[in-house]
Image (spheres, grey):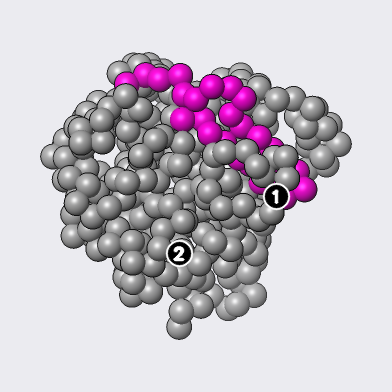
C-alpha cells in the first residue's frame, strides 16, 4: 500500500459517506488525468511492469483490469490507463437513464475490507453515454487499452422485454467498446437475476448478437450465488449462443457474519467474496475444460489472490474494492507480484499459469 494513501488519503475517505468519497476520488482522477503532466505523474507513481496477455482476440499489456461500477460513466478513462490497468470495464449502462436506488446505498466495512452497494444501475443511459464517448473520442480521450462496457436492464423495462433493452444499448455503444459484458447478475435490480435462466439468457444474447455490427466479443457476468446446476446451464447457453467468455463474479448476497454494515441490503464485494469467486472460476473452468476465457473478479486484495484466480482458470482479472481499501498502488503491487511469481515458478508466460491448479 502506498505510504501517502495510508497516511493521508485513506483517513480522509474513511470519514466521508462512501458514495461521496467515491465521487470525489473519481473527480480528482479525472482532473489529474486531463493533462499530459498529470498522466505522466500517474504513470510514474503507479504503472507496473508489462505482463502481456492475449485473450478474446485482444492484446493486453497486463492481465489486470478495472471492474465495472468504479467508473460508471467513463469519466476518467485516460486516468485508469495512466495508472497502469491493462483494460477498463466501464458501466453498467442501461438503455434508459436512471437515478438508481435511494441513498444511502453504498457502505464500507473496513474490518472485513468489504463493500456493500445497492446502487441500482444509476447511470446516464445509452444515448447520453454515446454522446460522452463520442466527445472523448474526438478529443483523443479514449484509452488505448481495451475498453469493456458493462450493460444492464433498465429498471422500468419489463423482464419479457429485457432482450430489446440490452440490444438497444449494444447498438448505441457498438462503436466504442472492445467487448460488451452482459450483466444479468446484479442483485440490485428487481428480478434481474431471473434472466440468468436458460431461455431468458439465450434471448438476450441472441438479440445482442444481432445488434453487434462490429462482431466484438460478448461476455456474460454471473452471480457467485448460482447453484452448480444453474451455473452449468448459464455456461452451456452462453457458449451455444456465441459468447466469447464469462466474467466471474458479480457481488454476493451472502454475508460472512452479522453486524450493522453487514445487515445492509445489497451486493457484497471485497475480501469476503474472494474464496467464493475463485471457487466459481474453478467450476467454470472444469465445465469448459479450461477452453473458454474467464475474467476473474471478486475480492482480489494482493498478488496471491490474483494468482489463485489465474491458476484456477482465469485468463484476466479485475479489481474494485482493493482500490478503496489499499489505494492505487495495488495495481503495481498485483501485476509486479504476478510477474515475480511467474519467474519463481519457472514459467515464461501468463498463459502457462492459467488453470495450473487443474492439472
The magenta-colored residue range is: 96-120
Picture coordinates of residue 158 (x, y %)? Answer: 25, 30
Q: How many marks?
A: 2
Q: Which quadrant of the structure image shows residue 248? A: bottom left
Is-magenta flag for residue 101? yes
Which residue appears at 41% of the width and 58% of the height?
Answer: 226
Magenta: predominant secondary structure element?
Answer: loop
Residue 348 located left or right of residue 326: left
Task: Name, please, the residue furthest toward the right.
Answer: 7
Mark number for residue 281?
2
Picture coordinates of residue 287 (x, y %)? Answer: 33, 71
Mark number for residue 258?
1
Look at the numbered discs 2 and 1 and tell me whether their residues touch, using CB distance below 8 Å: no
Which residue appears at 42% of the width and 69% of the height?
Answer: 283
Residue 149 located left or right of residue 33: left
Picture coordinates of residue 24 (x, y %)? Answer: 65, 21
Q: Secondary structure at mark 1?
A: loop
Amino acid at each position: 500500500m502506498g505510504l501517502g494513501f495510508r497516511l493521508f488519503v485513506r483517513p480522509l475517505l474513511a470519514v466521508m459517506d462512501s458514495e461521496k468519497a467515491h465521487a470525489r476520488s473519481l473527480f480528482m482522477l479525472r482532473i489529474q488525468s486531463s493533462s499530459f503532466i498529470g498522466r505522466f505523474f500517474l504513470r510514474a507513481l503507479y504503472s507496473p511492469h508489462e505482463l502481456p496477455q492475449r485473450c478474446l482476440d485482444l492484446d493486453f499489456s497486463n492481465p489486470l483490469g478495472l471492474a465495472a461500477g468504479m467508473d460508471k460513466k467513463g469519466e476518467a478513462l485516460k486516468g485508469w490507463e495512466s495508472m497502469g490497468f491493462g483494460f477498463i470495464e466501464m458501466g453498467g449502462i442501461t438503455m434508459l437513464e436512471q437515478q438508481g436506488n435511494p441513498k444511502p446505498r453504498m457502505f464500507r466495512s473496513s474490518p472485513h475490507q468489504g463493500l456493500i452497494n445497492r446502487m441500482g444501475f444509476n447511470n446516464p443511459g445509452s444515448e447520453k453515454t454515446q454522446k460522452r464517448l463520442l466527445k472523448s473520442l474526438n478529443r483523443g480521450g479514449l484509452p488505448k487499452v481495451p475498453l469493456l462496457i458493462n450493460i444492464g436492464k433498465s429498471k422500468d423495462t419489463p423482464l419479457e422485454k429485457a432482450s430489446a433493452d440490452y440490444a438497444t444499448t449494444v447498438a448505441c455503444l457498438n462503436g466504442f467498446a472492445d467487448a460488451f459484458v452482459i450483466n444479468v447478475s446484479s442483485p440490485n435490480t428487481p428480478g434481474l437475476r431471473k434472466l440468468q435462466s436458460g431461455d431468458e439468457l439465450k434471448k438476450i444474447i441472441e438479440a445482442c448478437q444481432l445488434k453487434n455490427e462490429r462482431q466484438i466479443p460478448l461476455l456474460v457476468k454471473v452471480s457467485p450465488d448460482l447453484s452448480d446446476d444453474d451455473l452449468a446451464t448459464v455456461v452451456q447457453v452462453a457458449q451455444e449462443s456465441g459468447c466469447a467468455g464469462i466474467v466471474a463474479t458479480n457481488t454476493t448476497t451472502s454475508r460472512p457474519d452479522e453486524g450493522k454494515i453487514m445487515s445492509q441490503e445489497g451486493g457484497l464485494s471485497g475480501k469476503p467474496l474472494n474464496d467464493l469467486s475463485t471457487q466459481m472460476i474453478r467450476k467454470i473452468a472444469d465445465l469448459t475444460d479450461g477452453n473458454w476465457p474467464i475474467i476473474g473478479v471478486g475480492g482480489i486484495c494482493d498478488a496471491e489472490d490474483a494468482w489463485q484466480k489465474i491458476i484456477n482458470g482465469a485468463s484476466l482479472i479485475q479489481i474494485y474494492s482493493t482500490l478503496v481499501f489499499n489505494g492505487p498502488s495495488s495495481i503495481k503491487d498485483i501485476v509486479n507480484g504476478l510477474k515475480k511469481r511467474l519467474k519463481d515458478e519457472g514459467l515464461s508466460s501468463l498463459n502457462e499459469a492459467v488453470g495450473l491448479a487443474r492439472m
